[in-house]
Image: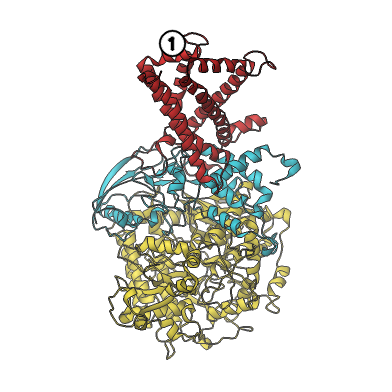
Chain colours: A cyan, B yellow, C red
């Protein structure tokens, strides 16, 4: 196979960037999209040009490092797939592929296709945990968790924090990420004691960085883990309920 | 053997002399194992260690490098205890550390299935699985703590798989004869890491942990024989910066990427522990590397890494190759009687569930014999059709759905239609920096956790035990033992980072960066990595011989000197520069690979993941030499142009008596 | 203390504000604004439906619709004085309208700030549809239309044959102007598209999500938008084309 890549190059956060066109021959259909960039970079190094910077690590769809806007779609044309697990057999021979970094105010570009997603960590730090200092835990099977609940929590917890939801959202909102993080914990019995404060703290922090949800559903469509927007509805409900709770007297009871 | 020269790399600052090696016993290293019966050692030890008063804890600063299971759990727990923690990770978020990719599960001796499991059995299985090359006391402690880990993780909200009654589910894993593995779909590592990361995030929020992302540790600073801090490079700005503390904790993972193709993440590397080694820490058993039997075979030469498929597939999958050599028929058209279920044939008792090393070598044996399958003839079949016929597709879907999807995505083949193709790949490294029972290396103040240390798995690790060890080290062991080293330092401030000890190491780090940028050669960093990987895999992979190892030991220094003459690293230091990052890591692999081969050459026996073709039984099984090699080989760096010195820690087995493994 | 994100790059730092009265803090949140938009949207949907049902009486003849208009003014009598309930409803409606628009404006501004630099290559949307992506434009069209509509049929300012109280005659007079009729039709198509997304979206914003009825949320929105649009477009269309009377 042979492809033409139209890649966003930007030297540093404050430089203006532009698209550069590169031809890559000898593309194997079994190659992953990131391996295509490996080959491109080898070509560039040979020519004495700086290779394209892109975030990547595990290359098996779980670390959430890879982050490319491919032909206008976060993580490219295949649904339920991170860029690293997208393979060249999904493209036509001779295709032109445009690759851009995630774009959001909260994700400043560091270089080329690499962005800073640390705002996600700030959201988690605001309350995305269960306070259970090491050593305090009781026997694990004392906490019964119905299978349905545990499965639903796992569906939310599958989030890899890649930021595709923000990248794809026309509003640059992080609702799907935040909802997944909140609902993973809010659904579980262990998460109840901090349920209402968690949702308030995390949502408030999210809104300092990101846009708002207008229910485009684009996030769900590009999520490599296919996390459902049902969690966004649950988060909205928890948030409003938390706002009206008299928590001083009722504690965190639902 | 000719004397080979060590790194011609830039002259690093000379390593200062390290304080007397941990209680050097007459005949070698002393692991400082507590007295008493094995079941009481850990509780006795917790009573014996010095404590730091709660009000004084905040006066101690601890630098933790690495944010995987071990590092994140340690940093979070130390923060909870009140220590001042500095967390350094080269990832953009602590949550991306490679622990996240572990699929299968985590072992714990809960005996929820009432199937005869116990702490003692997990201890025994781990020692035996490790081919009697691990320290009994450490392994027993690990088995003991496994139970607390599950409690801790459930309390944090890790969504482990559950039964319909709401109780935790278990499965049997990787050759264990009891069901003791807890799992969260095929994403157990992810969920455990998120648990630890969330606990860490809470400590960051509370201000107990100071987080530095995209910051890579490039050297260790030692003053007066103590580890006093690290020197890092900010991957975004290129700024070299030192962090100082009363103790340094390395939890930087394993070195599988010395083989280039492995299941490890692209950034996983040996740099932190290698630099610590060059500053005086002993590297123990580097030749103990684990090959995982169920990975997706490489599809072409561009392959950048291999993808692991959880070993749990072997619970339901049957492994076979065509009996006929060069059989080109699609698998479905090969009738049952023309298939060779070679594991079931050779190991009737364990069948497809033989330990990883046995399963891996058996696959290599079939492929080398020319019965490999797939376009590159580089795999064997793993066939779920019998299990699908028995329990139905729905059950198989429920168990392995994400693996099936992953396989289909990567290969473009539907595993429900044709059997999967698998082949072994380097996956985990049991070796690492030598540590004592407190997880402290021979350098006082330097602690090493998780895969980065050598401690608990011996020559081979059981499936679902890596997560267990990382979390045991981070949540429970280090927080209880670090006080012993810190208490005597009460009242001392950390060495200021403008101390000459720091300045010297900082300039060495800057010099190396400059040198790499100034070579301006013709070969890319990846080219060198790939070449090193070829040498390592061919000559020091699944089967090693004196001849192949000597060849590797001759070739690696040549490659290394070519690296320093001919590497091409473009761009500058002062910006985000991934080639530069990688160049430093490959430079260290090029030094470390040689030590790995030397260790493999010196260990004239086969055990666990280390298979020397000269040492095998008539059936082709690993042949140990307990009389000669029942020790931990800890190597001391003696200079860039000198042979490393060997220190031995004798292993004594009081409770689990060495026997030859047999899985027939 | 929350760590500031600006460590690596110029990622915006936390801008957490001081505690303020509940109403203020509540309204500050985008989720609460969306919740208020959903609540006000429901009020507006109810109004749009009632308005249509009332106006369809134009097809029953002059007396029916004029009588209906008079009945609206007498609503609540004799308990309440003349037109008081009607004005009450108008105030609620105006309030809902203002909240809906102000919240939408503020959220739009927030969303613009969230992505100051647009993508430089064309987007390939998977799920976001025409309706969801044009909410702010269909919203503006509806707003402008409502202003015109009030001037036309409530105040009569722009209606040449305006006669207070004679709804029937005013409607005929307005729709006899073809461009006005076309404007009504276009505006009502925009309203339909707006409702198509809004009547589904409000369930999400309110957190009403249940696998048992999730599919019906979409059917409801389609049905509601379809019915309102058909009715609203039918009136100018039929009157202007002279099919009726």
Please, what secondary structure does the residue beneath circle 1 have?
loop
Tell me which residue sits at (36%, 68%) in the image: B533
Does residue C135 show up?
no
B239 left or right, relative to B82:
left
Does residue A170 show up?
yes
Q: Quadrant of residue C122?
A: top left
Q: Quadrant of residue B298?
A: bottom left
Residue placed farthest to the bottom in the image?
B618
In percent of width and height, residue B408 lies at 38, 62
Which chain is indicated by disc 1?
A: C
Residue B21 vs B606, above or below: the answer is above
Tell me which residue sits at (55%, 23%) in the image: C98
In percent of width and height, residue B440 lies at 59, 67
B365 left or right, relative to B113:
left
Q: Nearer the viewer, residue B320 or B176?
A: B320
Q: Nearer the viewer, residue A13 or B358?
A: B358
In percent of width and height, residue B373 lies at 32, 74
Total labels drawn = 1
Residue B100 vs C143, above or below: the answer is below
Mark 1 Cα shell of 10 Å, populated few (<14), some (14-19), many (≥20): many
Residue B399 vs B205, above or below: the answer is below
In percent of width and height, residue B95 lies at 52, 54
Q: Quadrant of the N terminus of chain B?
A: bottom left
Residue highlighted by disc 1: C159
Q: Nearer the viewer, residue B43 or A134?
A: A134
């Amino acid at each position: 196979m042979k492809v033409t890549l139209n890649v966003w190059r930007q030297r540093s956060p404050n430089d203006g960037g532009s698209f550069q066109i590169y031809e890559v021959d000898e593309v194997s259909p079994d190659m992953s999209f990131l391996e295509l960039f490996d080959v491109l970079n080898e070509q560039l190094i040979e020519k004495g040009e700086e290779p394209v910077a892109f975030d990547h690590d595990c290359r098996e769809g779980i670390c959430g490092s890879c982050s490319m806007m491919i032909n206008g779609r976060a993580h490219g044309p295949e649904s339920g797939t991170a860029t690293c697990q997208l393979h060249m057999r999904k493209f036509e021979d001779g295709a032109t592929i445009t690759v851009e970094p995630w774009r959001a105010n909260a994700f400043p570009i560091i270089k080329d296709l690499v962005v800073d997603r640390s705002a996600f960590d700030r959201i988690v730090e605001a309350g995305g945990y269960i306070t259970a200092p090491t050593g305090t835990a009781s026997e694990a099977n004392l906490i019964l968790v119905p299978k349905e609940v545990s499965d639903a929590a796992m569906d939310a917890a599958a989030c890899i924090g890649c930021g595709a939801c923000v990248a794809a959202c026309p509003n640059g909102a992080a609702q799907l990420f935040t909802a997944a993080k909140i609902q993973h914990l809010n659904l579980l019995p262990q998460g109840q004691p901090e349920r209402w404060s968690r949702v308030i703290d995390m949502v408030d922090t999210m809104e300092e960085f990101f846009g708002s949800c207008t229910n485009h559903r684009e996030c769900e469509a590009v999520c490599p883990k296919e996390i459902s927007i049902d969690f966004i509805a649950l988060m909205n409900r928890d948030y409003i309920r938390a706002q009206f709770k008299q928590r001083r007297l009722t504690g965190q009871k639902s | 053997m000719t004397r080979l020269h060590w790194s011609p790399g830039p002259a690093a600052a000379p390593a200062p002399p390290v304080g007397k090696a941990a209680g050097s016993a007459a005949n070698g290293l002393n692991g400082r194992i507590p007295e008493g019966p094995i079941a009481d050692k850990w509780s006795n030890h917790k009573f014996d260690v010095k404590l730091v008063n709660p009000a004084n804890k905040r006066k101690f600063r601890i630098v933790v490098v690495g944010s995987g299971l071990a590092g994140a759990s340690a940093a979070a727990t130390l923060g909870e205890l009140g220590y001042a923690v500095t967390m350094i990770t080269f990832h953009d978020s602590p949550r991306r550390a490679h622990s996240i990719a572990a699929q299968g599960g985590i072992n714990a001796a809960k005996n929820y299935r009432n199937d005869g499991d116990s702490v003692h059995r997990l201890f025994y299985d781990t020692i035996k699985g490790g081919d009697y090359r691990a320290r009994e006391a450490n392994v027993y402690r690990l088995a003991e703590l496994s139970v607390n880990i599950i409690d801790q993780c459930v309390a944090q909200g890790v969504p482990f798989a559950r039964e319909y009654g709401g109780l935790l589910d278990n499965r049997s894993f990787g050759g264990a004869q009891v069901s003791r593995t807890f799992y969260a779909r095929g994403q157990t590592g992810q969920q455990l890491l998120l648990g630890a990361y969330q606990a860490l995030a809470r400590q960051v929020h509370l201000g107990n942990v100071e987080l530095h992302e995209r910051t890579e540790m490039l050297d260790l600073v030692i003053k007066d024989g103590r580890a006093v801090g690290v020197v890092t490079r900010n991957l975004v700005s290129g700024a070299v910066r030192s962090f100082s503390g009363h103790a340094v904790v390395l939890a930087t993972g394993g070195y599988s990427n010395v083989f280039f193709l492995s299941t490890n993440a692209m950034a996983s590397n040996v740099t932190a522990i290698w630099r610590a080694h060059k500053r005086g820490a002993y590297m123990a058993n580097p030749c103990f590397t684990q090959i995982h039997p169920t990975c997706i075979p490489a599809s072409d030469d561009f392959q950048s890494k291999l993808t692991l498929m959880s070993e749990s597939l072997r619970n339901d999958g049957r492994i076979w190759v065509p009996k006929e050599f060069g059989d080109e028929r699609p698998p479905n058209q090969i009738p049952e009687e023309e298939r060779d279920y070679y594991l079931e044939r050779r190991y009737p008792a364990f069948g497809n569930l033989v330990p990883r090393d046995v399963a891996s070598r058996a696959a290599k044996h079939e492929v080398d014999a020319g019965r490999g399958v797939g376009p590159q003839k580089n795999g064997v079949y793993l066939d779920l059709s019998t299990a699908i016929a028995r329990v139905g597709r729905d059950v198989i879907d429920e168990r392995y759905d994400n693996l099936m999807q992953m396989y289909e995505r990567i290969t473009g083949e539907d595993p429900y239609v044709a059997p999967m193709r698998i082949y072994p790949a380097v996956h985990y490294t049991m070796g690492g920096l030598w540590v004592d029972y407190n997880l402290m290396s021979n350098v006082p103040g330097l602690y090493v956790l998780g895969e980065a240390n050598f401690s608990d798995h011996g020559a081979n690790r059981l499936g679902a035990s890596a997560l267990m060890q990382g979390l045991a080290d981070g949540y429970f062991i280090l927080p209880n033992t670090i006080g012993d080293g810190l208490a005597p330092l009460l009242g001392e401030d950390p060495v200021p980072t403008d101390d000459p000890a720091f300045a010297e190491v900082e300039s060495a780090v800057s010099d190396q960066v400059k040198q790499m940028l100034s070579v301006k050669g013709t070969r890319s960093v990846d080219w060198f990595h790939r070449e090193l990987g070829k040498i390592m895999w061919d000559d020091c992979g699944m089967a090693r011989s004196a001849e192949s190892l000597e060849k590797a030991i001759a070739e690696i220094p040549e490659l290394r000197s070519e690296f320093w003459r001919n590497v091409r690293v473009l761009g500058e230091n002062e910006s985000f520069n991934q080639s530069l990052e990688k160049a430093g890591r490959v430079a260290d692999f090029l030094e470390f690979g040689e030590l790995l081969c030397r260790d493999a050459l010196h260990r004239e026996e086969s055990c666990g993941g280390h298979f020397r073709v000269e040492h095998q039984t008539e059936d082709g099984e690993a042949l140990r030499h307990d009389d000669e090699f029942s020790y931990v080989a800890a190597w001391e760096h003696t200079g860039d142009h000198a042979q490393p010195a060997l220190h031995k820690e004798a292993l004594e087995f009081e409770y689990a008596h060495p026997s030859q493994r047999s899985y027939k | 203390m929350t760590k500031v994100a600006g460590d690596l790059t110029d990622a915006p730092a936390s801008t957490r504000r001081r505690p303020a009265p509940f109403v203020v803090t509540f309204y500050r949140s985008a989720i609460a604004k969306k919740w208020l938009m959903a609540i006000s949207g429901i009020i507006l949907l109810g109004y749009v439906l009632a308005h249509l049902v009332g106006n369809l009486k134009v097809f029953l003849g002059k007396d029916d619709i004029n009588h209906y208009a008079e009945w609206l003014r007498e609503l609540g009598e004799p308990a309440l004085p003349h037109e008081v309930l009607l004005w009450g409803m108008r105030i609620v409606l105006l309030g809902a309208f203002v909240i809906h628009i102000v919240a939408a404006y503020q959220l739009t501004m927030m969303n613009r700030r969230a992505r100051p630099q647009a993508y430089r290559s064309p987007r390939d949307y998977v799920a976001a549809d025409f309706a969801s992506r044009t909410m702010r434009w269909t919203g503006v069209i509806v707003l402008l239309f409502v202003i015109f509509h009030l001037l036309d049929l409530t105040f009569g300012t722009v209606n040449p044959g305006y006669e207070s109280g004679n709804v029937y005659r005013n409607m005929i007079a307005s729709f006899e102007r073809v461009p006005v009729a076309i404007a009504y039709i276009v505006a009502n198509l925009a309203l339909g598209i707006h409702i198509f997304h809004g009547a589904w979206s409000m369930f999400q914003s309110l957190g009403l999500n249940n696998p048992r009825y999730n599919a019906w949320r979409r059917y409801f929105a389609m049905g509601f938008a379809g019915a309102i649009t058909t009715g609203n477009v039918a009136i100018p269309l039929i009157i202007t084309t002279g099919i009726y009377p």
